[in-house]
Amino acid sequence: MLKSFRYILFPLSVVWGSVIWVRNKLYDKNILKSAFFNFPIICVGNLAVGGTGKTPMVEYLIRLLKDEYKVATLSRGYKRKTEGFAIADDASTALDIGDEPMQFHKKFPDVTVAVAEERLVSLPQLLHAKPETQVIILDDAFQHRQVRAGLNILLTDYKNLYTRDFILPAGDLRDVHNSSKRADIIIVTKCKSHLTIEEKNKIERELNPEEDQCLFFTKIEYSSPYHLFNKQEKFLDPEAHILLVCGIANPKPLQEVLNTYSSTYDMIRFGDHHIFNTDDLNEIKKQFSRIGQENKIILTTEKDGVRLAKFENELKDLPVYVIPIRHKFLFAEESKFEILIKEYIRFYKRDSPIQE
């Protein structure tokens, strides 16, 4: 039914796609200007509206670089209740800076985490506030062409490649297929663990990357859950009844994992980046209490965890656990990817602060 409805909206997608195409052409021909900061800037983005694994990829880059360089992240801060430029501090909450930046800040307190709607304006503010910064990671900024990053990483979901998708509203794309040519690195994410060379080659032919583009494949790897508040790790008991609480774009990979770990689970699903309120909390507690067996836990994602943290007094006596995820590179290409990232930073040439 939903697919049929989207097909009806296809003419609108054609119109919207034409607008995006014209906008990109204006940037390509330098009629609309892109600012180039003579500074190592890595952009992580996608062509779709979400669910490709941008957040764990930003975290992957942070882990890779933070011991050698002073790293900063810059995000829009989606669904935050504030406006303008801000840098996370000890008083910050998910409502102040957004759930994903809050997740970065909590996991990597020594990394500068900044939010702003306008990247072009906020990048100089960030460098002025944190002059020791050596590399900036732009989170979800592939379509923000006012700033031209030095290295663009484009993610696409294995089960919904951008080559098989349509522009909104008929599909999930917010940019045209041809924009993929602006990426330096393309990563097919959320692949199945046993992806074969034949399947890999077939996808490569379909995506048809340029000669100077590097293509990688990753799967999602889940780590041991930890308690939302005391951070104590817990191994998933296959006999435990799990109540999964999530507000993410695509919970299917997590559901597939739970199907292998647990004999039974229930799920309460909210919209992507959902801001939990008291009614949601009461619903979670009510559904958890309905589970008859004693061996039971509430499981949620890290992004949802930072939004549930404000209810610590109400949830501290309940077994609420967070399950972290990471990208795992397939075909033993992790080193190749990491070398590309580090070489970009190491051999970066600085001619002038900002160029247009």
Image (cartoon, rainbow, N blue to C red):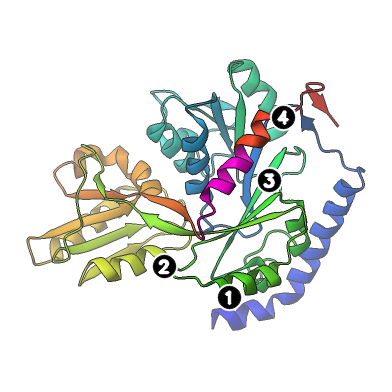
Query: Magenta region: which residues?
Result: 331-341
The first of marks 1 and 2 along the sequence is 1
Residue that numbered label 3 is attached to: 152
Residue occupying the point 61% across, 16% down: 131
Q: Nearer the viewer, mark 3 or mark 4?
A: 4
Looking at the rendered image, the quarter that the N terminus falls into is bottom right
The amino acid pointed to by label 2 is: Lys
Observer able to see residue 138: no
Q: Earlier in the sequence, mark 1 or mark 3?
A: 3
Whichever of labels 2 and 4 marks the residue nearer the N terminus, that label is 2
Q: Main secondary structure of the magenta part?
A: helix
Secondary element type, mark 1 = helix
> Mark 1–mark 2 contact, CB under 8 Å?
no
Q: CA distance from mark 3 to mark 2?
A: 27 Å
Residue depicted at 55% across the width and 67% down the height: 158
Magenta span has 245?
A: no
What kind of residue is marked 3? Asn
**Position in image of residue 14 (x %, y %):** 78, 70
As rendered, which of 90 and 2 lies closer to the eye?
A: 90
Residue bearing mark 1: 198
Disc number for residue 252: 2
